[in-house]
Amino acid sequence: MKIKPLISILAATAIACTSLAFSPLAASEIPISAETAQATDAVFYDDFSSGTLDPDKWLVAYKNWGGKVTENGEKVDYNGGVLPQNVSVQNGKLILTGNGNLYQGALKGVNKDGSRRADGKRTGAAIATKEYYASGSYEVVAKVSPELGACSAIWTFEYEEDWDTGDITNHEIDIEMPGRPSAEKTNQSYRYALCNTWVGENEGEYKTGYTDIGVNQADGAFHKYRFDWHTGNENEEPRVEFYFDDVLTYTAKESIPTNAGRLWIGLWFPNGWAGTPDFDTSYFEIDSVKITPFHESGDTAQNETYPEDGWGSLEDISHGTSVQGDVNADGTFDIADIVLFQKWLLAVPDIKPSDWKAADFCEDGNLNGLDLCAMRQELTSGNTSPANQVYVKNTEELKTALETAKAGDEIILTEGDYVYSGATPKGYMFTSSADGTEKQPIVIRSENPEKPAVLSGSSTAENYVFSISGDWWEIRDLKVTNAQKGIMLDNANHTKILNCEVYNIGSEGIHLRDNSSYCLIENCSVHDTGVVSPGYGEAIYVGSAQSTTEYGYDCHYNTIRDCKLGPNVAAEHVDIKEYTIGTTVENCTFDGTGMSGENYAKSFVNIKGNDCIIRNNVGYRNGCTAIQRAFEQNNVVDGWGQNASVYGNKVYMDTATNALGKKMYFLNAWDCSATVWDNFMAYEGELFSIDNEDDQWDYYNCNLLTYGSGS
């Protein structure tokens, strides 16, 4: 790469004068000095989800390197350098822009001496870490610029000059694309990369790896670029291993640097060897950057000669065309903008809008609460057309996303804990009353189902973690914990709860209440409920008891499917209340461990509604003496608890006699009508069929029983 300093070391006055040519540095952007900078211990990671370049992590380059060409008999710089204005963050991606030979825009390049050029042709962009790193694994997920003539590059760099001898030390590792098959500067393509190592700039002090990747990298897709830098210790040979999409492709064992350096990422214009840049504009897109230090004994400290040379201001990076409301300058107006602006109005430290003009909804040149109110109204009005995906990463953003949700929104939670704080009207914590539609449901989900977001209350004795009182929601891939109740649906019809885990709850885990019908609970795990109130610690509760009058009873045609319920569910695994119709419980697994027996809890499922279907479930009593029968129906209100279909179930009840010395019934359903078939039970041994009508009173304590056939 051979990045040369913009300034000369020959005269202090030259240093002072040339420095004035650079964009001013904000206080937070001043690089660490050579005397104090040391290799850092922490893992470095950035996925650019903040919407701007993090000043605590990055510097933005304003400098020129790349060699000279002869024009009109004079030696001039080949390219226009790398400029902050060609750096932007858009939609969670770092965008490095390169302007080629056909560029006609207003941007002007910079020469090596700091003077401005007449045009912006062959200008690129580059950023570098503020900290210095030595041995480690360096990983960048990116989409390379597909245009020949522009070099998409990832490299470490540390440069020293001996002012007495003039000797140069250049410790560097490169991945540069396009590459070529040999030293001859022809046949450039994106199937090749240059994988280089440097300890100096003289012959024998660097090694160029002409590397055949085997796959075209300019395919419009993101790829993972990685090198593992070993400076060596008693167990490690000094080397650099280069990986493309996790495939070890090239290993360098010569000219292995040891000095800690900054990691650079850039799109720049080499003099000829990458091809001819006959295009207008091209882009190098970066999704994420990760550095995992190895701290090998071969590491040596950096001693950068020009640590503060050639940096521009982060305020100069491009945010593209301003979108009204897009105060974080990520290209869309969404919940994150409202949260950021609200924090700024409240003078939260280190918070400021990236584009303050986008927040001036009143167009009066002042930012205040009136603008915030207008922002909220605009976002919920349906007049805006941002992307429906709303990313949240903390409690306040989640609260705001729920408050302003509208049909078609997809609220995506990044990995982490969302612990509720603040006022809880009616005991509701994370809550929304918005309605989706059949074609545009409102979705709330974890970004990574393998590492789900955790929604948490503050105490198992009070409040509801997550409650919805609108129709057509999809709640997916979340963990819910640490409150009196877990997930509550009130008048939330056509809502799905999918692949969620609910646990450590004071009372019931999931409750479908207040006229919530046509809902689905699927692939959920509910355990450790009733930790404060065991008699009210159901895993899933459908409807409301007759004694409860403040909620609607019509919770009809809800389905509970493929769920794992238990262990340590203190009351029934499923309690289906009177006045409900058509509840289906199917393909679920019940673990009876820990059922309390309080408040008459003594079975896996308690059926008090009509027309229920209980099918293809598996239950394990697991020695819990509180469980006295597998299933039961109760006629607590005249005309209810009737017409159940119970079939295809298998239950392991441990013993033929329950703790009261009575028969261990499969179904206890006196004065309740039920149709049964294809059910199996086991005591201490193997499962056996219980559907011989001659044996009814051994297994079914039901005076209104009908044996069906499944037809």
Image (spheres, grey):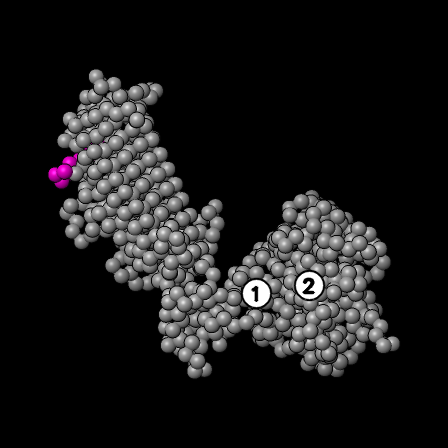
Between 347 and 675, which is closer to the camera in this rendering?
675
Up/down of 310 relative to 490, above or below: below
In the displayed structure, does residue 119 sit left or right of residue 461?
Answer: right
Q: Which residues are magenta?
A: 632-639
Q: Is residue 530 left or right of residue 387?
A: left
> Looking at the picture, which amino acid does disc 2 mark?
Leu
Residue 486 in the image: state x and y as whole percent.
Answer: 31, 49
Q: CA distance from mark 1 to mark 2?
A: 15 Å
**Looking at the image, which residue is at 58% across and 57% down?**
287
At x 75%, y 77%, the residue is 113
What residue is shown at x 25% (from left), y 44% (from top)?
Answer: 556
Q: Secondary structure at mark 1?
A: strand
Q: Is residue 259 magenta?
A: no
Q: Is residue 299 left or right of residue 702?
A: right
- Would you name the residue on which mark 2 appears? 267
Q: Secondary structure at mark 2?
A: strand
Q: Image quarter for residue 18?
A: bottom right
**Callout 1 amino acid:** Val
**Can you say which quadrant of the picture contains the C terminus?**
top left
Q: Tell me where residue 169 appears, x and y as whole percent.
A: 78, 63
Q: Which mark is residue 628?
A: none
Q: Quadrant of the N terminus?
A: bottom right
Q: Which residue is mark 1?
A: 89
Main secondary structure type of the part rendered in magenta: loop
